[in-house]
Image (cartoon, rainbow, N blue to C red):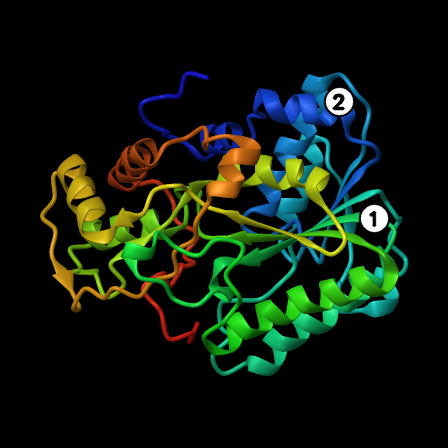
Amino acid sequence: MTYPETITSVEQLEDLLAVPTPELVEFMRRLDGDIMILGIAGKIGVSLGHQAVNAIRAAGVTKRVIGVSRFSDPASRELLESWGVETIACDLMDREAVQQLPKVKNVIFMAGRKFGTDGSEHLTWAMNVLLPYWVGEYFRESNVVVFSTGCVYPLATVESCGCDESVAPAPVGEYSQSCLGRERVFEYCARTFGTKVLLFRLNYAVDLRYGVLHDIAMDIANNRPVNNTVGYFNVIWQGDVTANALRALEMCDNPPAILNVTGPETASVAKTARTMGGIMGLPVTFRGEPGNLCYLNDAGLMCRKFGYPHVSLEQMIRWQAAWIANGGISIGKPTHFEVNNGKF
């Protein structure tokens, strides 16, 4: 695919995020059953639903894509339905409501809580641990891809090249601990009910309206020092994330399979910021002493299974710098990538 030099509108961005890869189209031809996305109204879910519908149409097959959420913002529901996603309004924290959902062969679980955990730990644990049991119990006969996070791993040094799937979890802080709790609950459901599960450990998706690159570019644009306390990171284009999440339905297993999902490069905060500053024509300053303990994941297994991400780190940096420089919108949800003490 030929990519544009810049992305100049939300509509162009949404369309680009939802372009199905040839591999995803072929996957849809052999996938058995419909797809349900639980928690679809979140940052990644809307693009996932859009891409799934596009891939099904390109494959020339008939499948339902069902998106479930509270839909507190009606605009996201209208947008999804305009693309061909069937929607169901449901509070997933209501166990009885979950049990009224139609059963489907393939489920992608995206519900969860991160932002605002510090001070509301009880709600984070309920959403990240209690809710997964209700879903795992009810959809016991489905293939379930469970969105998780690379934050369940211990912090890694840049020399280590990050944690691969064989590294034992050692989460720092209550958010990360609750995410491991979510994984353990789905593992329990798999072992108890025979459910096939894949734990999709992601860090960090890039959408231009949010993400690590967005946070760095916003600091530069607003003449703020870039936080260099956590000096390195991994990122991956959100369109690659969603394509891999759909294809991961084929990897669900019992006991649960694990897949790290991120870019293969270890990116430097300082180098990325200076590159962006050059593109934007703005000076770059830093704050904090560069640290060597970061959330870094090894994406080798992902690349072997699905190939190298279609959008490179260099391309993402160029797009992101131009997006912010040209006044592109932000959804106002920082990633807190510079946090390595677990307090989100």
Residue 99 image offset from top left, x and y in percent: 89, 61
Report whether residue 79 is seen: no
Query: For mark 2, what is the residue?
Result: 29
Label 2 or label 1, whichever comes before in sequence order: 2
Viewport quadrant of the C terminus: bottom left
Is 154 left or right of 36, judged from the image as shown? left
Residue 246 image offset from top left, x and y in percent: 66, 38
Picture quadrant of residue 46: top right
Report whether residue 201 is seen: yes
Residue 57 image offset from top left, x and y in percent: 71, 21
Residue nearest the viewer, comparing 322 with 168 = 168
Picture quadrant of residue 322: top left
Q: Is residue 116 above or below residue 306?
A: below
Q: Amino acid at mark 1?
A: Ser
Picture quadrant of residue 113: bottom right
The residue sitting at 36% across, 61% down in the picture is 337
Is 213 left or right of 221, judged from the image as shown? right
Query: For mark 1, what is the residue?
Result: 142
Residue 117 image offset from top left, x and y in percent: 51, 75
Residue nearest the viewer, comparing 55 with 263 = 263
Q: Dot 1, how many residues are within 10 Å of its Cα: few (below 14), some (14-19), or many (20+)?
A: many
The residue sitting at 20% across, 41% down in the picture is 276
Q: Is residue 53 above or below residue 234?
A: above
Q: Which mark is residue 222?
A: none
Which residue is the extreme one toward the front?
A: 166
Residue nearest the viewer, comparing 288 with 93 = 288
Label 2 to label 1, Cα distance in Å? 18 Å
Q: Amino acid at mark 2?
A: Arg
Q: Secondary structure at mark 1?
A: loop
